[in-house]
Amino acid sequence: MVSITQYNLDKIENLLLDLGYKVRYEKGNFRTGACVIQHTKVIVVNKFSNLEIKINSLVQLLREFEVSKEDLNDDKQWTFYKSLIKKKEG
């Protein structure tokens, strides 16, 4: 799993941006830390969540998306994406 840092949150946001998603931080009643607005490419993240919940919520959403190597700008992003969606083995 990725370490819980602001730098990694920024990298995840950039990855989602390259996939065509806009990430917004707003207050609201969330059962989870983030959600995709129906039929759009907008992800709303609970701005009051801590850094760990924000990162884990975005990674969980990424696991639900179908992403190919061609969707991303470069090999570094593809490698980062693959490391995010890799299930923890144990």
Image (tube, helix red, strand yellow):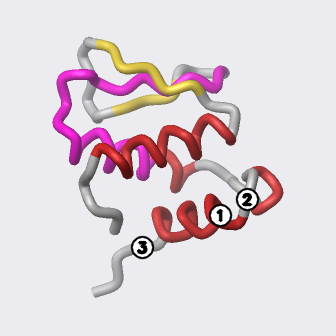
Q: Residue at x 44, y 20 (%)?
A: 24
- Circle 2 is placed at which residue position? 74
Magenta region: which residues?
A: 40-60
What residue occupies the far right of the structure in this picture? 70
- Place residue 2 in its image quadrant: bottom left
- Place residue 32 in its image quadrant: top left
- Circle 3 is placed at which residue position? 87
Label 2 Cα neighbours within 10 Å, binned few <14 / some 14-19 / many ≥20 = few
Q: Please report contact status of discs 2 and 1: CB closer than 8 Å, yes or no.
A: yes
Q: Which mark is residue 16?
A: none
Q: Amino acid at mark 2?
A: Asp
Give the number of the mark in front: 3 or 1: 1
Q: Secondary structure at mark 3?
A: loop
- Circle 1 is placed at which residue position? 78
Q: Amino acid at mark 3?
A: Lys
Q: Residue at x 38, y 51 (%)?
A: 8
Residue 71 x, y percent position in the rendering: 77, 51
Give the number of the mark in front: 3 or 2: 2
**In terms of depth relative to the viewer, which is nearer, 28 or 14?**
14
Check if residue 57 falls in the magenta segment. Answer: yes
Residue 47 x, y percent position in the rendering: 26, 22
Give the number of the mark in front: 2 or 1: 2
Q: Residue at x 47, y 48 (%)?
A: 11
Residue 79 x, y percent position in the rendering: 60, 69
